[in-house]
Amino acid sequence: MARQPQERPRGKAREQEDDGIVDRLVHINRVAKTVKGGRRMAFAALVVVGDQKGRVGYGHGKAREVPEAIRKATESAKRDMIFVPLRSGRTLHHDVAGRHGAGRVILRAAKAGTGIIAGGPMRAVFEAIGIQDVVSKSLGSSNPYNMVRATIDALKAQMHPKDVAAARGLKYATLQARRVTVAGQDE
């Protein structure tokens, strides 16, 4: 009896295997290289990917055509994903600042129903990571590459209260009780 070859998913089906991974195209830049025969055009893409459950990554890809540049950037972003702890799966645990080059950002936790108050490149990061309520401000550079990198830098500094309690030698419940009394009410 002849053995049937097992079919493997190709193309879009392979993309479906990465369940829950969403990608956002942040910026496309057309670059030109001057050569003997004239100008040689190429494209650079900046892509943010995330699972909307706390994991996010960004990637940069360059190619002669736009779809190839986007594909390269998406693969790069999936390789370098980080995990960010979220409070109630919707906002940050604490306010944080991040920087990269001349780009600086400030991220603040927000009450339920606030929404995403952020500029374009930062909004793409928050949507990919699954944050629903956040207030952010970009200071300095408006370059999308620096804004995305500064936002990721800020998110890397985000700590879960359990980690803070362990670092301080306290119990998690004690730390949460302090948070409720200081804030007046838990959000």
Image (cartoon, helix red, strand yellow):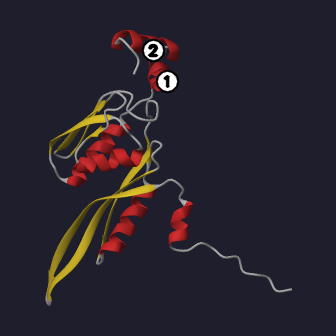
> Relative to 29, is 142 above or below?
above
The quarter of the picture where residue 133 lies is: top left
For the point 55% across and 69% down, the residue is 13
The quarter in which the N terminus is drawn is bottom right
For the point 20% across and 71% down, the residue is 30
Q: Is residue 124 left or right of residue 160?
A: left
Among numbered discs 2 and 1, the one appearing first in the sequence: 1
79 or 106, nearer to the observer: 106
What is the residue that sits farthest to the bottom in this orientation?
37
Q: Position of residue 150 (x, y in %)?
A: 26, 44
Q: Is residue 116 left or right of residue 77?
A: left
What is the residue that sits farthest to the top in this orientation?
181
For the point 38% across and 40% down, the residue is 131
Give the class, few, some or many, for how many residues have Cα within 10 Å of label 2's Cα (few <14, many ≥20): some
What is the residue that sits farthest to the front in this orientation?
113
For the point 41% across and 17% down, the residue is 186
The quarter in which the C terminus is drawn is top left
Q: Position of residue 171 (x, y in %)?
A: 52, 14
The quarter of the picture where residue 3 lies is: bottom right
Per the image, the residue denoted by label 2 is: 175
129 or 64, nearer to the observer: 129
SS label for mark 1: helix
- The amino acid sitting under disc 2 is Leu
> Relative to 173, is 95 above or below?
below
Give the class, few, some or many, for how many residues have Cα within 10 Å of label 1's Cα (few <14, many ≥20): some
> Relative to 16, is 135 above or below?
above
Per the image, the residue denoted by label 1 is: 162
